[in-house]
Image: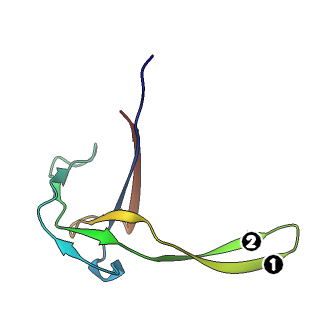
Amino acid sequence: MVLGLDISIYFTLFESDFVNITLGNYGQVETAESKVPWFMVTSDTILIEHKIFDPKKGTTKVAISKPWLVYYISNMQMYFLFTKQIL
């Protein structure tokens, strides 16, 4: 039997997204389209406000998600990137 570990990794382009910031050297990532590595320089928690629509009631409510651990990459070209891996 092979056991897997489900890992979610979150990245953001904006340092202002963070509730708290922990500066440090968190390594680097490289995309398939770019040969230039991106350096992760900050990590901690961010807040994401989003709307949830209930089709049965026809109502919408605002919710706030709090993903942790999120990494900040200053030269990233997307607002928010989610990567999921099974190791």
The image shows residue 45 at horizontal and vertical percentages of 36, 72
Q: Earlier in the sequence, mark 2 or mark 1?
A: 2
> Which residue was labeled with disc 1?
59
> Which residue was labeled with disc 2?
53
Q: Residues within 10 Å of mark 2 (few under 14, many from 20)?
A: few
**Is there a contact, CB below 8 Å, between mark 2 and mark 1?**
yes
Residue visible at 15% across and 54% down? 27
Mark 1: amino acid: Thr
Label drawn at residue 39 = none
Observer-nearest of 26 and 77: 26
- Quadrant of the snapshot with the C terminus: top left
Q: Residues within 10 Å of mark 1 (few under 14, many from 20)?
A: few
Relative to 51, 10 lies left or right: left
The image shows residue 30 at horizontal and vertical percentages of 22, 48
Q: Residue 84 lies in what quarter of the image?
A: top left
The chosen color scheme is rainbow
Mark 2: amino acid: Phe
Mark 2 → mark 1, Cα distance in angstroms: 6 Å
Q: Secondary structure at mark 2?
A: strand
- Quadrant of the snapshot with the N terminus: top left
Residue furthest to the top in view is: 1
Relative to 67, 16 lies left or right: left
